[in-house]
Amino acid sequence: MIYVAIMGYGTIGSGVAEILDKNREELKAAAGQEVALKYVLDLRDFPGTPVEDKIIHDFQIIEQDPEVQVVVETMGGLNPAYPFVKACLMAGKHVATSNKALVAAYGTELLQIARERRVNFFFEGSVGGGIPIIRPMYRCLKGEKIREITGILNGTTNFILSKMDKEGTSFEAALKEAQDLGYAERNPEADVEGHDTCRKIAILTSVATGCEVNYEDIYTEGITRITDVDFKYAEKLGASVKLFGSSRIGDGQVHAWVAPVMIGKQHPLYAVSDVFNGIMIKGNMVGDLMFYGSGAGKLQTASAVVADIVEAAQNLDCNVVPSWSNKRLEIADVDTACHRYFVRIAGTIAEKEAAVKDIFGSVEMVCLDQEPEFALLTQVMSEAVFKEKAVAFDRSCQAAGEAGILQMIRAEL
Amino acid sequence: MIYVAIMGYGTIGSGVAEILDKNREELKAAAGQEVALKYVLDLRDFPGTPVEDKIIHDFQIIEQDPEVQVVVETMGGLNPAYPFVKACLMAGKHVATSNKALVAAYGTELLQIARERRVNFFFEGSVGGGIPIIRPMYRCLKGEKIREITGILNGTTNFILSKMDKEGTSFEAALKEAQDLGYAERNPEADVEGHDTCRKIAILTSVATGCEVNYEDIYTEGITRITDVDFKYAEKLGASVKLFGSSRIGDGQVHAWVAPVMIGKQHPLYAVSDVFNGIMIKGNMVGDLMFYGSGAGKLQTASAVVADIVEAAQNLDCNVVPSWSNKRLEIADVDTACHRYFVRIAGTIAEKEAAVKDIFGSVEMVCLDQEPEFALLTQVMSEAVFKEKAVAFDRSCQAAGEAGILQMIRAEL
C-alpha cells in the first residue's frame, strides 16, 4: 500500500482525490500496489465530503508520518507551498505538484534536494494541464536535440483570443465572458499579461536544456492590446492570433519570449482553440511534434498529478525525474530574435506606399473596407532592425503631420 | 559503453545509425554512458558508408556476442525478423523494433519472453512514426481508463486523401502522385486497403487494454472507393474524409475498426494533413488528448527507435515495457458500432425525399449543383440498423425502376 497526502483541497487537489478513488483499479495495476489517500491538508474542514475524515490542519503530521511516501502539492503560490514541499523532500517523500509558480521559482533547488535524498520532485501538472508534456520530454525525447518549443500554454487567454476570432468581439467583452464562465479570475493580470505562460515556457526550457531558466529573463508581452480590428485583418489573411510562449534553442544562442503571434492555417497550433492548450516541439531528428489537450480543468490537471504519483510509486527508491543544473541559461536579447511583423498603419496605401517601400522594403499589403488604415507584412528581420524601421517610419509620418504605426504583431505566416 | 546492433540497414535502420552518430552527446547524457553501434546485419555490403566496417551477414555473431545488449530490428516483415528477435530476447538482449507486422503478429509471445528474461521488447517506432505514443500510453496514462483511441495512422493514405481534398483530384491520380513521390509503394494494397492502419490500431488497443488483439478481428475498410465527388460534398459540409483506425473501449464491449470517416473542422484530427499522423486518446479523467507528428520518414521513425534504445539503456536489468497478457480481447461485431452516415443517392431530393424520410427518419440533406444526385446525413444508429434501412431504401428505388444509394461514408459531424 502506498499512502498519499494531498496539500490543498481546492479544484485540483479535490480532483486528485476523486481520481484516486474512481480509478483505484487502474492505479493499483500501474503502481503495483494499492494507492490510498491518507491525509488532506487544508485550512478548511470539508464536512460531508468523502475526505472529511482525512482532513488535517497541521503540516507536521504529514512530514512526520513515515507511512506517507508521496505528497501532492496543489495549494498554489509560494508560501507555504515552498517550505512545505522542501520539508517533504528533506523527509524523504516524493512530491508531485501542479504549481508552476513554485517550479519556476524554486525548481532548481527542489530538484537538487530530491536528487540528494533519492526521491522525486515531479511537476507534470504545472504545464499544459492534462497534456503529457514534461514526461514525454524526458522519457521519449532525450536522444533529440530540442530546437524549438512553442506552446499555447494558457487556456484563459486562448479562450479570449478564440472568442475574438470567431465572434469579432472586443478584448474587454471576451475577457468579461471568460470571467463570467469562471475561466478567468477577477484579477486576470497573471493570464492576460502573459506571466502564467512565461513561467510555463521557462519550465519547459529548463527541461529541454538541463539548465536553470530565470523566468524574469524572458521577454513577456500579453494580449491586452490585441483588438477586434487585428482579427479582421487576420481573417482576411487566413490567419489567427494566438499567445505563444516560445523557446528557440540554437547551438550558441537561446531565445525565449512570450507574445501574441499571427499564424496561418498551416501552423500545427492554428487549430488549438478555446481553453485547449497545444505544445509544439521541434527535435533535430524527429521534426515537429505537437501535443494537444485540456490545458486546465479539475480532472485534467489532476490526471497529470496522478501520473506523477504513479511514476513515484514505480520508483520509490530512485530519482528518475529529469533535472536541471543550477547553471543559469543565458537568454539572448529579444532584440536579436527574428520574425516577420504584421503592422497596421493609419492612412491609405496610396498615401503611404512610397514611405513603406522606402523604409520596410518588400512587403505584402492588405486593407479592410471602410477603415482609414491598412496593414503590411514585413520580411523576416530582427526586432532591433524592425524597431529602427518603425521609428524611422513614424518619424516620416510625423514630418508629414500624419499618424503612423497603429499596431505591431509578430507573424509566422 | 552500451553496444547496439542493427538488423536491417534500410531506410529506418540507416536512420538509427545516423542518429546514434549525430546525437552521440545527447544519447550519452540520457543513457548514462556512451551508446555505440557495433554491428549492422544486412545481406548487402555498404562500401564507402560510415557503417562499412560494421556490416555482418551472420546473425549468430549478434546472438552470441555478450557485449551487444540492445538489438534494433528494422528489417520489416516476419521472416527472419521473428526468429531473429526471438533469439535475441532469449539470449538476454533488449530489442527495439519499428516493425508493426511483427508486433501485431507476435507481440504477445515476444513480450512474454522479454518479461521472463528480464529484458525489454520495445516497439515505439511501430506506430505513428516519430510520434511518442506507445511510451506516453504506458508512462503517462496508466492511471486513466482509456475510452477511445482514434488515429490517422498511415501517412500514405493521408497524403492521398489530403490531395483529393485540396486539389479535387481522383483517387487514382492522387495515388499515382504518392507513388511518384515515393510515399506509396508500387503495390499500395497494404496502405490503401487499410491493412497497415489495422495492425497499428491493434497494437494501440493491446497497449490500452492489456489484452492480446487479433488484428484479423478488426473490421477493415480502405480508401479505394472514396471519390472526388465525396470530397465535393465534404467541402460543402465544411468537412473532410480521413482514414481512421479506432477503438472505442466501453466497460463491457470494445469496438475496433478501420474505415474512412467524414469529419468536421472541430475534430482534433481534422488538421492532420499530408503525410502527418495524429492520434487522439480519450481518457476517463484527462479527456481528449492528441499527439501529432511525422508518421513516417527515415529520421522520424528512427528517432522513435532511438528513444527505445535510451529506455533500454536506462533499464538494462529490468523489464519496464508495457505488456499485455495472452488473454484475447473480444472485439464486438462491427454491426453493433454506432455512427452517423453520409449517404449519396441517385436522383433529386424532390423525387426521393418522401422515401428518405420514411426510411431514414430525420436527416440533413445537401445537393451539389449540376450533379444528378444528392446526399444525406443520418442520425446516429448502429451499422446493423443502417444496413437494414439501406436495403429497404434500395428496394424502394428498384421498385420504382430507379437507382438508389451510390455511396456510404461513416460520419462524425
Image (spheres, coloured by chain):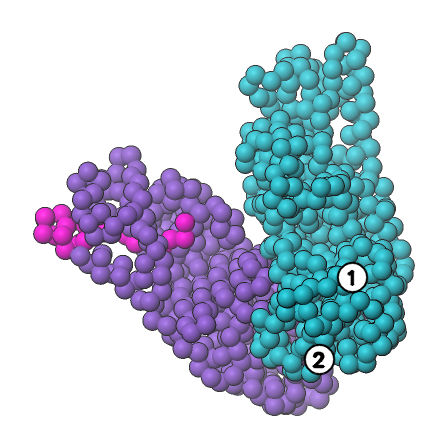
Chain colours: A cyan, B purple
Give the image location of residue B177, x and y in percent: 44, 50
Q: Nearer the viewer, residue A74 or A232?
A: A74
For residue B18, which quarter of the picture? bottom right
Q: Residue at x 52, y 52 (%)?
A: B268
Give the residues drawn in magenta, as a range. Answer: B393-413
- Residue under circle 2? A2
Which of discs 2 and 1 lies nearer the camera? The answer is 1
For residue A212, which quarter of the picture? bottom right
Amino acid carrying mark 2 in the image? Ile
Give the image location of residue A270, x and y in percent: 59, 44
Q: Is residue B394 magenta?
A: yes
Count how many numbered circles sit on residues in the image: 2
Task: Say above or below: B333 vs A133.
Answer: below
Q: Residue at x 21, y 48 (%)?
A: B356
| Apparent side of residue B412 relative to residue B354 in the rendered image (left or right) | right
- Structural distance between the alpha carbons of marks 2 and 1: 25 Å
Q: Chain of mark 2?
A: A
Q: Nearer the viewer, residue A282 or A17?
A: A17
Give the position of the N terminus of chain B as an image quadrant: bottom right
Q: Nearer the viewer, residue B382 or B312?
A: B382
Residue A43 is marked as 1
Label 1 residue SS: loop
Q: Residue at x 74, y 47 (%)?
A: A197
